[in-house]
Amino acid sequence: MPRRSERTPTFRALAGVVVPPLSAMADIRLHHAERVPQTGAFVLAPNHMSEIDPIVVGAALWKAGRAPRFLAKESLFGVPGLGAIMRATGQVPVDRTGITRDADPMAAARALAEQERSIIIYPEGTLTRDPDLWPMRGKTGAVRMALQASVPIVPVAHWGAQRLMPRYGRGIRPFPRKRIDVLFGEPVDLDAYRGGPLDQATLLRATDEVMRAITDLLVELRGEPAPAERWDPSKRGQSETGRFDG
């Protein structure tokens, strides 16, 4: 089991507030939760379809035995009440350019790794632009974190959260109760990229492996094939603003 200090009283109190109402609205079913490391640091890399995803993924990771931490928009830390909770639970602030107010976000994330804690980073950086909600082209932040901190990166896919809150939606649709499946994958083998220079080409190749792993998990959940080509917003004139792009 993880060190007791990870599941702090603040985390337990927060889980007591968040998990019961979420469970009332959604039946969250974990698949292969045993793949979640129960000790040590790791990066959890999920797909991203809805604004409610962080709550769903955070609850799933909590149910799997670990405490969730995110790279989160710095502006959220200024919200009364919410900011205090985020600081107390060790969330990592980044602004829209990927720079924290006080330090490099990657250094802050590595500090969490040194404390043997998990961190959730969305490789897509923002909600997928794919019209059928398949994972789109990834950014390099999650892989760079994993390689620089020498920690595993665990892919995870979920399906069903978009029924609870549609993409770009602001309202929750609690009735009828939704089913959300969360499938954890085996850590992505990044050994070929460790120990060498982390130039952009290397990071992009490693990121593509992570996105392929996430997509394969989602194929398993959806029971249908993914598109032959991953959606690339830069080739379609779409904005890519989001949480953290590395």
Image: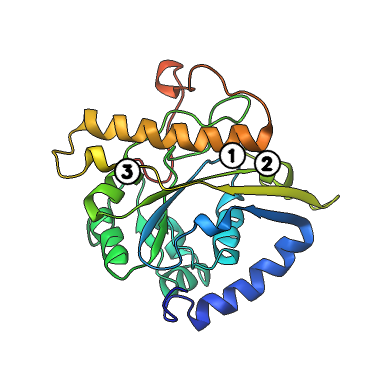
Q: Which residue matches tag 2? A: 162
Does 239 sit above or below residue 25? above
Inter-mark Cα distance, 1 to 3: 20 Å
User: Residue at horizontal 44%, vertical 34%?
Assistant: 211
Q: Residue at x 40, y 58 (%)?
A: 119
Q: Report the residue marked by disc 1.
A: 49
- N-terminal of the pair, mark 2 or mark 1, is 1
Q: Is residue 23 left or right of residue 31?
A: right
Task: Mark 2 and mark 1 in contact? Answer it, CB < 8 Å.
Answer: yes
Q: Earlier in the sequence, mark 3 or mark 2?
A: 3
Find disc 3 in the rendering and name its residue.
143
Residue 41 in picture, x, y percent from top left: 35, 62
In the rendering, at what x and y percent does residue 53 appear?
58, 49
> Is disc 3 in contact with disc 2, using a CB cutoff of under 8 Å?
no
Residue 171 makes an appearance in the image: no
Q: Secondary structure at mark 3?
A: helix
Q: Position of residue 212 (x, y in %)?
A: 45, 31
From the viewer's perspective, is residue 66 above or below residue 147?
below
Q: Position of residue 137 (x, y in %)?
A: 43, 28
- The residue shown at (59%, 79%) is 13
Write the residue at 52% across / 32% down.
135
